[in-house]
Amino acid sequence: MGTNTLRLETLLIHGGTEPGPGGATTVPIVQSSSFAHATAEDLEDIFRGRKVGQVYTRVGNPTTESLEKRLALLEGGIAAIATASGMAAITTAVMTIVRSGDEILSSSSLFGGTFSLFRDTLANYGIASRFVDPTDIEAVKAAVNERTRLIFVETIGNPKMDVPDIEAIRKVARAAGVPLMVDATVTTPYLARARELGADIVIHSTSKFINGTGSSIGGAIVDLGSFDWGNAKFPHFEPFVKKYRNFAFTARARKLIHKDFGACAAPMNSFLLSEGIETLALRMERHCSNALQLAQFLHDHPKSAWVNYPGLADSPYHEVAKRQYGGRFGAVLTFGLGSKENAFRFINGVLLAKNLANIGDAKTLVIHPASTICADYGPQEKELMGVTEDMVRVAVGIEAIDDIMEDFAQALEKV
Amino acid sequence: MELTVNGKPATIDGKEVLDIVTLLAELKVEQPDYVTVELNGEILDREAFSSTTVKGGDSVEFLYFMGGGR
């Protein structure tokens, strides 16, 4: 059966896989730094790009290559690059596109690490970022200028839980002649495939739902092959467009930025992430169903001041999320308890849920963002990111929902 | 047909002319979905692989951006 006719649930298990040594059905973990070749001529051909072959795990590894093929196929992309972490994926992808003097137009509702990269780190290298509410299309349009070289959004803002209309943002990006990069970590290809969303480049922190058990850190860049890099705004792509045509982005990333920055995936992690892919559909179904039930429970609970989850009918993002993500709304939600003290009492009161900085684990996770992952930001920035002092973020796991609700109910009694 | 492939002489028996898609299969070129093909110094568009033909005396280069040294 051709992979292009398979449904996503089947593609997750069979897509891009090849029989391993001796008939192995899982990808071998090739734990080798470098790869020997028979002759000097062979290695010369590989270095010149005339022949396919592995040289050094920083630039390519068979276990990682297998993961890359699977991820590209899942998103409907033409190629993928697996990286050491989600932040490595964003850094590599963004640095492939922008140069000193360029600007990034970014959603203001961002994961804290991405916000710090854009606002602080890249600014030190002459790359400025403009932050804009991604749900206000007129504001997005107005923020484009002659220096804009990239538009960046998250499929569901973490932790703001806002949902941009990606098709509308794609139109703004097309009109501006710049690519649209979408971080789809919280939705995964199960809720929406990047090709259908209209992204040009997709980012995943594969550490989250793709891994699924909190066992390894990883990231991925998927190239949809949809952007015309021959555009005059990107003269640095010219040699890559000439030689590699619609693979220009991946070629520039691989031959320069990914190779030079060196944030490569570890083969062991690539193996664990490949294993995670196979159960993604089942897990996401349970994650999303548990999250919706927990959101409704919190919504109706007298101790909770507010709940923010796009699956709730009173969320201002409910309709757009429903349309884009097939009636599923992800597994991250936030709720308020009126004060920081109450939020701490709740977190100290849960028995099953873990207090830690992550999402996308099988286990239910809770955190107080204002004092942890967003602690470095001032009041104005916290407001932009939708972070309040009384807010608890929950990454809902796949335990029995009644146990999660009972755990939350007993912790709320302590508030 | 005698061709120059990646700088070395290559013979394809029984064919006088063939398109790039067939050539990739005949020469068992690895990862055909990712290869760039240069015909007599000109890079070909992927969409043109099935409509572009090679004949005796042509020079063909296959280039990869993945694997390898880079």
Image: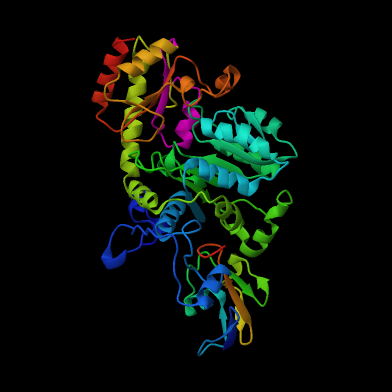
**Where residue B63 sits in the image (x, y, percent)?**
58, 69
**Frontmost residue, A315 versus A391:** A391
Residue placed at 50% from the left, 35% from the top? A155
Residue placed at 52% from the left, 33% from the top? A113
Give the mark count. 0
Residue placed at 31% from the left, 45% from the top? A279
Q: Quadrant of residue A127?
A: top right
Give above or below for B8 relative to A181: below
**Where residue A378 sits in the image (x, y, percent)?**
58, 19
**Where residue A395 sits in the image (x, y, percent)?**
38, 29
**Frontmost residue, A411 versus A109:** A411
Give above or below for A44 relative to A394: below
Q: Is residue A407 magenta?
A: no
The reply, left or right, for residue A113 in relation to residue A6 is: right
The reply, left or right, for residue A30 in relation to residue B44 is: left
Give above or below for A89 relative to A45: above
- Magenta segment, which residues? A314-339
For residue A104, say whether it is visible.
no
**Frontmost residue, A285 versus A389:** A389
The reply, left or right, for residue A104 in relation to residue A25 is: right
Quadrant containing the N terminus of chain A in the rendered view = bottom left
For residue A240, say whether it is visible.
yes
Q: Is residue A329 magenta?
A: yes
Quadrant containing the C terminus of chain A in the rendered view = top left
